[in-house]
Each structure stands twice: as structure tokens, then as C-alpha cells.
Amino acid sequence: MTITPDFIPARETDAEPTAVAAALAEIAAAIGDAHVVIGDGGEFRDPFQPIEWDAFATAGVAQPGSTADVQEIVRIAGAHGVPVWAQGQGRNNGYGGAAPRLSGGITINFRRMNRVLELDPDLGVALIEPGASFQDIYDAIEAADAGLMVSVPDLGWGSMGGNQQDNGLTYLPYGKGWRNICGLEVVTADGELLRTGMGAMADNASWNLYPRSLGPTIEPLFFQGNLGVVTKLGLWLMPKPEVITHVHVDVARDEDLIPLVDILRRLRLDGTIDGVPCILNTLLIASTIAPRAHWYEPAEGVIPDAVIDEIAATIGIGRWHLRFALYGDRAVNEHNLRKALDAFGAIPDVRIRHTTTGPEEWASLPDPSDRVYAGVPNLDWNTMAGWRGGEHGGHMSFAPVAPLSGRQVYDLQMWLKARFEQGGLDHTADLIVVNERSLCSVAGITFDIDDEQATAGAYRTMQELVREAGAIGYGEYRAHLHFMDLAQEQYGWGDHAYRRFVERIKDAVDPRGILSPGRHGIWPAALRR
Amino acid sequence: MTITPDFIPARETDAEPTAVAAALAEIAAAIGDAHVVIGDGGEFRDPFQPIEWDAFATAGVAQPGSTADVQEIVRIAGAHGVPVWAQGQGRNNGYGGAAPRLSGGITINFRRMNRVLELDPDLGVALIEPGASFQDIYDAIEAADAGLMVSVPDLGWGSMGGNQQDNGLTYLPYGKGWRNICGLEVVTADGELLRTGMGAMADNASWNLYPRSLGPTIEPLFFQGNLGVVTKLGLWLMPKPEVITHVHVDVARDEDLIPLVDILRRLRLDGTIDGVPCILNTLLIASTIAPRAHWYEPAEGVIPDAVIDEIAATIGIGRWHLRFALYGDRAVNEHNLRKALDAFGAIPDVRIRHTTTGPEEWASLPDPSDRVYAGVPNLDWNTMAGWRGGEHGGHMSFAPVAPLSGRQVYDLQMWLKARFEQGGLDHTADLIVVNERSLCSVAGITFDIDDEQATAGAYRTMQELVREAGAIGYGEYRAHLHFMDLAQEQYGWGDHAYRRFVERIKDAVDPRGILSPGRHGIWPAALRR
């Protein structure tokens, strides 16, 4: 009884419904009835999928309370040949939310395992459970008065564990190049336990301090992977600096993106700017303030350039808006701020504002984005999702990686804008500068999920974008459930040498293929097409 | 005709000598006679193994000139069932040099593939071949006047590729937590090619700029691994700062190591000190200046504490000597230097010296260690190897990982000193502070390789150390050929869950088990015991 449109690559597990029901019953007996949901409970789904569609649907959700529970769940599911789909809080919104790639299996959701198990203020490290949200971690740090900061993303309700396992981007210095996580505990497909790095040795105090193994380092296999279920994570936390200087740079014209990016690259390479800056376009900023209808009345067509300029003027921003923060001693921040002001000041008509604050002020900074850069989780920017449809607004992200080079970034954005507009979509852009040399160009496709036709159109445009961008050398850093196979398909160098190599590993460590089948385009042998 | 002592875990390949000879002949026909050495040529061995011993002996050395050559070598070796052992320059001294773990196979040595293929001064990135030495890379950067620095280790003759694939430590900021390498090209066991990260997509310009994949990140599998032969590496290069401030801190007493480490940790965590500082003991410094006999006449016994104090006084250092460098704008360096002077100045009787220099001065800095921290490769500290035996001096490193916590570091060093002295060995220590939270405690065991009995004694002591340290939670970050199995054996958590997981991967991607069998204790199925 599939009512999902044909073009959606929905897939069902081969496991018989009776086997799935039996597994769920056994799991309920093992971890407690109260911790098993039959079906998606109206909650463990993609919140941005039209309610009528039945793609990416779980048969039931198990919420373990301990590592031993996870082992039980994996063993029971394995014994019945039922696939599991592991997540953190289940807030992977924009990429499929709480839904699994393969329908009909069992979701492992970690909302009950949300504790900060250990916190060492001297070494700046915590040991956390996979469901601990950014808010949970922030609260634990503040309660302990540990003088540390957690690197957070725009929305603080997700889990650090889930976010990082999706290569999720966070904005503080430890977000740069993913320096947050060190040391994992993992349940493997046979229900046994594995610890990475120094954790492979009993009583080794460096498990969460030193990131490699003796022998090959396997830890990054569990990021965007389906080779194990992570049950504990070491988390590095940065000491609070004396001050944070928040800087916002607005440039007037699209072409100004070229010097903006090139100057930013130089200031990152020479160490003036650390952390993960973002460059947002006018419509992205507008979407954090109010829905589309507030800015532009006609529901049809795309917002014309002249109106975008008006919106920018109303908000008091430019066509592109760079935000970043400096973290350090006051004297060093002043020096680095001066350098940044001099460098960006050379762009014609640029506007720059900055504020410098100490730890006592961070929780009450008026700009939610400044709070994010100060490590204070919040949900203010969730407004974004309501660009079209308000409460029923949905969004998906198209997120290719690009070199941090002005000309290339500009050309890519102009190409994306044209392609979005061709598909009848407003082009919103959030360029997340993940390290000194590259960025993830996140373009948000927004739609009213009550409008099935518009939603289908948005999906179709995105499908074309993944393929067309892949053909010119731009690949996604992270893919929506809907586009995982297609996005992986673009990585075809050497006759898909990467995918074939990973598939060999998959078959070797999960021979029954029960762990998160299809995640980022990696399927077990029996389900490969 | 084995004349290696019994206690050495030497192993021979199962391949018949005729098969090995046939493979070498075919390889010579494919890549040129001039590029194949039969036997070790007196050179491709462990230079610190007594010449009479025949452990860890290669049957022949192939020196490819291109990726295609490497593919040919791997295919031919595979067809004959002959194992290969891949290296860079073959300078893994202290850990087995150019020798393979398994005797009787074919060594792939990359001295001919030593080019810098691409160099982008704007993005601070190069594409290098696996045999490019630190000196080759430095020379290429200077020739191009690229304004960049390569992170180097104490001795500049090794290759960046070989060093990094052994998790080798280098001292500049990009050495911290191994940020040097981004993007690999790899020959797999079937002779095909694989590219990691964004390189898995054709024409993706972010291959050497963005470090992860879509899907699980496999790149770190090839560091300390035996799952492929790396033929190209992306290399990140740091822009030259305005100035470098070299700082040397001497503390008088062993106990002073406690505040020294704790202060260093705080200054690293708060960002005052970047890069990879080292803490060296008196005898390690002495060994960089002159052989043991220069400092202490009796060849027997260990150097007494009173003499160590005299040596320290003669050199003008303390019992422990910290070296690090600050990289940045002059004003920022001055601020950070003041902070460091204040913090370390609180240790009683501490002595601190510092110098600040600009790029023009770095190549001619008088202290070779300062040149290393300025990214200028040299060989001056090679004197170290001659502590005992002069030209025939040998050394091995025992290198466990430890938390960057004063008390733990002190206790470990005192334990090591006692155990060294019990084995009749001088305790030399080089604590390499690889990140903000941990260090690699490298203890050099030195011996005269002409003195077989002393060498055997040194090996035995080290064997005991690996086992005893493992029992109290200290594991090696990198192991000598001789101790690879034993060091890996210590990582026994979960009934060796880590090793078993890696073995599954090994068998899946290299089913014939031909790539570097036994590297860091990972053997193919047919050779597991």
C-alpha cells in the first residue's frame, strides 16, 4: 500500500512482518515495554515528509537505557534478520529527521541515553552517551562550573553523538575539522563491544585523550557509517576564553563574495580566525526572522533580485553576510579584530559590526547566532524551516563541498541560484567554512509539506542538482535519505573504488547486513542492486 | 640458517623462494632492472640490528617510478603469492628502519617517487609522492617562494609519506594531532586504484582540501595499516608567520616535571602554545651533543644521578628541558610569550630562554632543534644514535601514550627510569606533546650493535617494558618490528575486539594477505597464530 510517489527511492526490508513483530516483542521483554514504540509514534519520522507519503517508515522504535540494552537489541534483531537504524535524538532534520533509509526495520533511538557520564575540567574532556543533546552537555558543564565550552550547531536540540556521526558541523573552534570526538565505544553487528583508539587497552587513561590506534585507526569508519552502533563518545571541550569577539561582515553585491571568501581564507590560514565561520545570503538570513510571506506576497515564482535587495536593506544586511567569532585573551582578540577590520574593510561598501563580551554575558546575548558562537545552545533559528508553510514548513539541504577559493565559491553560488530559480525555488545559502581550505555549501530547499505537488517538485529539483553538481566535481558532504544512493553514485572515481572498498568492509563486519542498511549509499551484499 | 636469537619473533614468508625469485624477475622486467635490488643491498635493513642477525630480512627491493609501476608490482607479487612490504624512504630508524616484519618477501621502497607534484601557495596545499623527503618538500617550497612551511621531525631525511603512515610525529602546528595529510591515492591488494575523501569523485577540486568522505571515512585505515599501498598524498602547508619565538624551559629536579606538564597543558588548552612541544631529559639532550663516553667513563652500569646533575650543569640545562615555539604576528607572540614566562616562572629555580626571529633567519639558526621548529629539516640530532657504539650505535624507542597530566607523567617517567636502570640502561626520555591532552613518551634504548650480548639485553628489557606497561594501561603509539605483535597484544579490551575487527577488514580487502603482513600486529588469516 505504497502511496509515495514513484520517483522516491523507497525500499522495504526483506524481513517478514512477523519476524519484525517477534523481534520487537522480544526487545520489549528485554528492555521494558515502556521503551518500545510500535510504528513511528507520529514522531520518529521525517517531519518534512508530506504526511500522506509512507517512504522511510520505521516498524518500531527501541529506546535503550544502557549499552547492555543496545547489545540485546542488536542481538535480537540479528537473530530475526531484522535491520536496525541507529540515531541520536532523531533530529537529523533536513536530511530525513528520525526516519530510516530502509522501511520496515527497527529504529534505535538514544533519547534515554543522554547522560554526561564523566567530566574532567582539567583535561577538558567528557564521556557522553550518544543521545546527550547539546543542551544536556551545556547544562552539565554549567552545573559543574567546569569553565568549558561545547561546540554547538544552529539548533541545540540534537545530540552531539548523532550530529557528529553524520559529520555534522558545529561552529566553535573544536568544530573546525571535527575535533570534538575522541574515543568511541561501539556495539558491533554480533552484539559485542569494541572500543577505538587507546580504549582498545583495558584501563588506558588516554582513551578519550589520544585519537589514534596502534595499527589502523578505525574510529572515522563510524562517522556516516553503518558498521557499528556507537554507545559512548569521548568529547573534547574547550576552556572558556577571556573574551569572545563576534564579527558580522556584510557585502552589498554577489560579486563581493569573491574577495570576501579570499580574505577569509587568508585570515584562517594565518590563524587570525579560528572556529567555523558561515557566509549566509540575504534570503537565508530573512528566513531566520520571518516566513516568506512576510517578505514577499506572491506565493508563485521566485523572489526577484530587486526584492532581495529591498529585504537586505530592511534587515540592514547585504547580499552576503559573514559571521565568525574570535576567541582569546582581550589583547589578542583586539589585534586579530584590527587585522580582520583592515582586511575586510578593503571591500567597497562593506559594513562590519563587532561586539566583545565576557563569559557572564554569553547566555543573554540578543542575537541567537552570537549565542551559538558562544556555545550557548538555542532553537531560535528553527524559524528557518517555516519559510514556506509556517508550522508545516519543510526543508532539505543540498550540501556540496567546495574549495575555499573566492572565484570557485562565487561561480558555484551563481550556478545554484540559476538552477534553484529554474526549479521555481528561492535560493537560500549557508556556506559553512569547515576548515582553512574548504567549505560545505548548504543550500536549503524549502516547501510547504501540505502542498504535495510543490514538495514533489522540490525533491525533483534536488535530484537533478545532485546529479548535475556531481558531473562538474561537486559532491555532497552529507545526504538526505532520499538522495543517499544518488549522492554516493556521484563518487564514481575508479569505477566506484571507494564504495566497493567500503562494501567489502561492510560485508566482513556485518555479514547479515542488519546495521543501518543503505546509510549514505552503503548497502549490505543482499540488498545491493 | 637462522642465526637470530630465539627470543626474536622473526617469521618467514610461506612463499617458495622460486616464487619470490620469479616475482622479482617479472617486476624487474616491468619496471626496469636498475630499479630492483636482490636481497637488502646492505641498505634496506634495520641499521640497528647486529649485522650477524638475519631477522626481518627482505628478499629484494623494488623501487617504482610511478603509480602504474606500483600497480604492476602488487599484481605480480599477488599472482605469485609473495608478500610486499611498503615504506617511504626506509628511514623508520628506531622502529626497524627499512626492514620488513615478515622475512623473504619484496620491499617496495619509494626513494624514486619523491616528487612534489603540485603546490598551491594560495590554498597552502601540495600533492606529493610517498617518497618525498622533508628536505625535498622544503626545497620545493623554497624554490617556488611559496611562503609556506612543512612540519618536520628531528631528522629531515625521512619521507613525509612514510613518517605519516607510521603516525610519525612532527613538531610544527600542523603536526599537532596529525593535520598534515588530506587525501590519498592508494593501490589496493588487487592492483587497482582507490582515492579517499573527495578524491572518490572525478575532478573534485576538494580532494586535498576536505578530509572526509560521503559515507565512512577510510583514510586513517592507511596510517599504520596494511590495507593498501599509498602512492599520492595531499599535504597541508602552513603559511610562514611574521615571527617564530623559540622557548626553552629548564627545571632542576625530577619532581618539577609535575608543574611543568600541568602548566604546559593549561597553556595548550587555552591556545597560548600551538604545535608539538617536547620535554626531554638531561641524558637525551646529552646524547644529541656527544656520545656517552664523553660524559661518563665507565662503560658498565648506568650513569648515576649525581653525574646526571653534573652533565646538566655542564650543558647548562636542567633535569627536564621543555622546548616549544610560538608562531604568529610579533604582537601576539609577545603577549603569549609573557603569559608563558609568567606561568613557567612560578616553578622554583626554573630557567627560561627565548629568541624571536623572522623568516630570513630560520635556515641559519644555530640550535638545530630551533631549526626543526622553524620547519628547516636537518640531520644534526642523528648524533643521538651513537650514544653507545658511535658509528655502530643503535637505538630503539619504547613509546607509550600518556595523559598530559603532571602527576601521571612524572610517575610514568620514574617507573621507566627504575626499569631502565634495572636493565642496566641509561634512561633517555623525549616526551612529545602530540595534542592538548596527551603525549607520546618516547624512551630511547641505546646499544652498541657490535655488542651482541648488550643488544640482546636491550631487546629483552624492552620486551618486558612493553608487557609491564601494557598491564598498567600504557600502550605504545608505534612499535618496533620486533615488538609489533607484543605491543598489539596489550590492546586486549573485549577479548581483542579491536584487533579482531581490523583482521576482518584485512581479510576482506586483501584476501591473499600480500600487503605488509604483520604490520603493527595485524596478520592475514593464513598467517595468524
Image (cartoon, coloured by chain):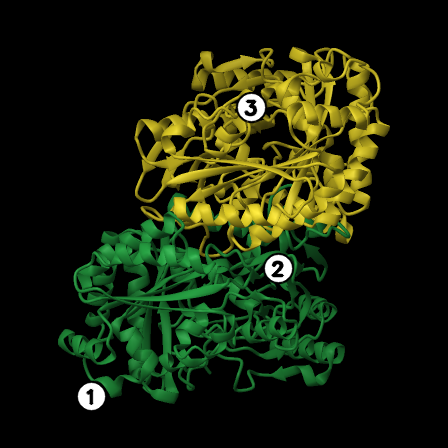
Chain colours: A green, B yellow
Instruction: Check contact, mark 1 vs mark 2: CB within 8 A.
Output: no
Q: Which of A11 and B361 is in front in this view?
A: B361
Characterize the local packing of mark 3: few (<14), some (14-19) or many (20 or more) Cα atoms within 10 angstroms: many
Disc ID at residue B90:
3
Q: Residue B525, how many percent across, how many down?
A: 69, 39
* Rendered position, A224 above or below A423: above
Residue B488 in view here:
yes
Q: Badge 2 local density, few (<14 within 10 Å), some, or many (20+)?
A: many
Tell which tag, 2 or 3, sits nearer the viewer. Answer: 2
Amino acid type at mark 1: Glu
* x and y percentages locating residue A406 in the rendered image: 25, 53
Q: Mark 1 lies on which chain?
A: A
Secondary structure at badge 2 equals loop
| Cα distance between the residues tagged 1 and 2 | 50 Å
x, y percent for residue A440: 37, 59
Query: Is residue A233 in view from this perspective?
Result: no
* Same subunit: marks 1 and 2: yes
| Mark carried by residue A297 | 1
Question: What is the CA distance from the residue labelled 3 to the residue labelled 1?
Answer: 69 Å
What residue would you read off at disc 2? Answer: A124
Q: Residue furthest left?
A: A306
Q: Do labels 2 and 3 share a chain?
A: no
In the orientation shown, which residue stands out farthest toward the front?
A: B349
**Which element carries disc 3, helix, strand or loop?**
loop
Q: Which chain carries label 2?
A: A
Q: Which amino acid does label 2 sit on?
A: Gly
Q: Quadrant of the N terminus of chain B?
A: top right
On screen, residue A438 versus residue B413, left or right, reads left
Picture coordinates of residue A135 (x, y %)? 55, 75
Q: Which of marks 1 and 2 is nearer the N terminus?
A: 2
